[in-house]
Image (cartoon, rainbow, N blue to C red):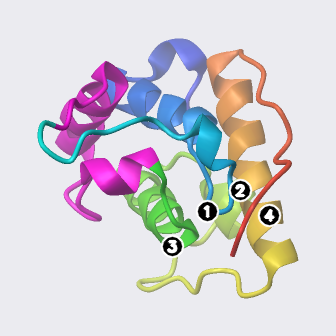
């Protein structure tokens, strides 16, 4: 089990992504503004692509996906980070990560998975994560 001070910058960036993620169905007024002509990429996206991208190669950390990640994208990130670091193996996958783990199916299972991921991330970063209030699955 990794302790907060043992986390690499790539792992910390990954955990920051989890804490900042937007779910489908979030209010459009809270969504970042992007111009169709010149799209500015937020610093946190560049840092996530650089740091987390050094740790995992799939899923591809595309700007659009990072801004408003669908559940399957987040699940695939959790799987790959666990494969590379062992983070969340016990809490998220029951101590054993299958070659192709099946994502949760129901809305309740997805919310429980994400909340568990947020909880262990916040614990490892010694920060606080608000409970999930909105999710569209």
Q: Is residue 1 visible?
A: no
Residue projecting furthest to the left? 37
**Residue at mark 2 to residue at mark 4: CA–CA distance:** 5 Å
Which residue, given by chain and number where applicable, does mark 2 sit on? 114
Mark 2 touches mark 3? (CB < 8 Å): no
- Picture coordinates of residue 111 (x, y %)? 79, 64
User: On the rendered structure, is 51 left or right of 132?
Assistant: left
User: On the rendered structure, is 88 left or right of 11?
Assistant: right
Within 10 Å of the Cα at label 1, are there few (<14), some (14-19), or many (20+) other Cα atoms? some
- The stretch in magenta equals 39-67
**Residue at mark 4 to residue at mark 3: CA–CA distance:** 12 Å
User: On the rendered structure, is 69 left or right of 80?
Assistant: right
Which residue, given by chain and number where applicable, does mark 3 sit on? 72
Mark 2 touches mark 4? (CB < 8 Å): yes
**Residue at mark 3 to residue at mark 1: CA–CA distance:** 12 Å
- Picture coordinates of residue 88 (x, y %)? 61, 50
State the residue in front, 7 or 34.
34
Q: Magenta span has 41?
A: yes
Q: Is residue 43 above or below residue 84?
A: above
């Amino acid at each position: 089990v990794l302790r907060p001070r043992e986390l690499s910058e790539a792992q910390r960036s990954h955990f920051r992504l989890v804490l900042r993620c937007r779910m489908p169905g979030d209010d459009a007024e809270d969504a970042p503004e992007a111009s169709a002509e010149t799209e500015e990429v937020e610093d946190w996206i560049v840092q996530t692509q650089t740091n987390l991208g050094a740790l995992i190669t799939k899923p591809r950390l595309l700007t659009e996906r990072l801004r408003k990640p669908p559940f399957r994208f987040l699940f695939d990130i959790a799987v790959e980070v666990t494969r590379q670091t062992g983070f969340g193996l016990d809490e998220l996958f029951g101590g054993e990560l299958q070659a192709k783990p099946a994502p949760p199916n129901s809305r309740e299972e997805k919310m429980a998975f994400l909340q568990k991921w947020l909880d262990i991330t916040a614990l490892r970063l010694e920060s606080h994560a608000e409970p999930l209030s909105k999710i569209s699955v």
